Amino acid sequence: MVRIPAVEGFAERPRTGSPKRAGKALREEVPREAHARFEPAPGRPDAVEAVAESNRGRLPELTPIRVGRMAAGPFSFLRGAAGLMAYDLAHSTPVTGVAAQLCGDAHAANFGLYGDARGGLVIDLNDFDETVVGPWEWDLKRLATSLVLAGREAGAGEEQCGEAARDAVGAYRRTMRLLAKMPAAEAWNAIADEELVSHTDARDLLGTLERVSEKARRNTSARYAAKATEDDGEGGRRFLDAPPVLRRVPDEEASRVAAALADYVRTLPEDRHPLVARYAIHDVAFRVVGTGSVGTRSYVVLLLDHRGKPLVLQVKEARPSVLRPHLEAAGFEVPPVPHEGRRVVLGQKRMQVVSDILLGWTTVEGRGCQVRQFRNRKGSVDPAALAADQIDDYGRMTGALLARAHAHSADPRTLAGYCGKNEALDEAVAAFAVTYADRTEADHAELVRAVREGRIAAELGV
């Protein structure tokens, strides 16, 4: 037999033991049933304190909009409270110690459609502001909790909400087992989007997905620019003021953002450079985005090609992940992050099967930023607006997508060994999700009370 020494970057030849057996053995240390547990730890921040702390460092004139969006409902509160949930997961729940690249904010509204390089539509996780390497179960518990809250908001009964959480975990578990059995190269791209509905038995969602897809195909830079820009009188176009969501910025600020795109281009693969070079920068504006992201610096940049056809880029501040302060309490190393925009982009590429071809990063006024196409045929399902009998279908679909994303960084054999064949993990995480959804509703009520009493400023309905 040829004896080749270990080569850096490649696996060693297997000798003894197996990842699947290691996953099974882990059940002795952290029983799957233990994941049902949640009891708030002593010293847990209250909801208002946590929201105020998460507003630190944001643009103060925009934080009332963020608070107002979080106050809209318990599901919206959860969307903006990833840091508070990370505290709870680190201090009040068992941790398996198996690491994966986490989305960090894997709630049910952070899955959606977007365009690939050839004009097709892909469905996957689509928000990575909080991405870090951490405990895989944190993403799964956040997803399950969000499905309970979204289901309640949609008018589903408690049994249906719990079933949606169970089904999401079950789909995660079954998908991980499937990936563990496949050759590595096949598993990497497994469960193509056209197979997703049948794989997860989500046929009740077909009509909804078709409507979202049709809308996503029209959601392009050109369509956005047609509505959000005007002729500048000099053969180009400029953004229209539409406060508080979209506003023009002073020339000096616009010039700094535009100049930062030179560094951005250097983060792109070299074969993208000729494409970017065919566009000229025409204007920069500030645009408020999301719920968790409100108050961060976020710009849209208008580029036009030789025919005047637009491409809009988003330059968005990347703050440190809100999960990062809690990883050490969960027993994970916290390595230094050289650039927050780079962290977001590399985490995204590590989890998605297909990523935006113009995804990169840069620095604006000392702040790390991610750069991506804006309105790249994006579409999403609002889980809180689904029919009650569709929540479980949506749970199965998102659970399968999360498993595929985690399997890019964690060995699916280890996770499949731990998750197992029966429904022990499904039941436990679903029980946690219901308990934590109740906790989130109480936190949301506390925030609403603080807004009503004037203890924290909120701008509602924006």
Image: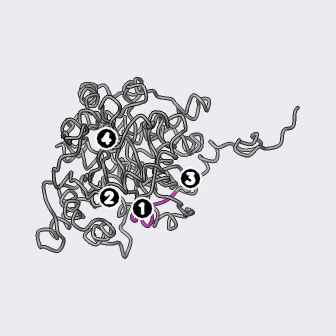
**90 within the magenta span:** yes
Nearer to the camera, 122 or 400: 122
Under mark 2, the amino acid is: Arg
Q: Are marks 2 and 1 in contact (CB under 8 Å)?
A: yes
Residue 173 seen in render: no
Say whether disc 4 or disc 3 marks the residue closer to the N-terminus.
3
**141 within the magenta span:** no
**Whole-Å distance between the Cαs marked 4 and 3?**
25 Å
Specify the segment rendered in magenta: 87-95
Say whether disc 2 or disc 1 marks the residue closer to the N-terminus.
2
Q: In the figure, is residue 93 to the left or right of 180?
A: left
Say whether disc 4 or disc 2 marks the residue closer to the N-terminus.
4
- The single residue placed furthest to the front in the displayed view is 234
Under circle 4, the secondary element is helix
**Whole-Å distance between the Cαs marked 4 and 2?**
36 Å
Residue 222, percent from left and from top: 27, 33
Under circle 1, the secondary element is strand
Nearer to the camera, 16 or 283: 283
Q: Which residue is mark 3?
A: 98
Q: Are marks 2 and 3 in contact (CB under 8 Å)?
A: no
Q: Which residue is mark 1?
A: 367
Q: Which residue is mark 4?
A: 164
* Residue 298 to residue 59: above or below: above
Q: Which residue is at 32% across, 51% downward?
A: 145
Occupied quadrant, residue 333 = bottom right
Colour scheme of this structure image? one colour
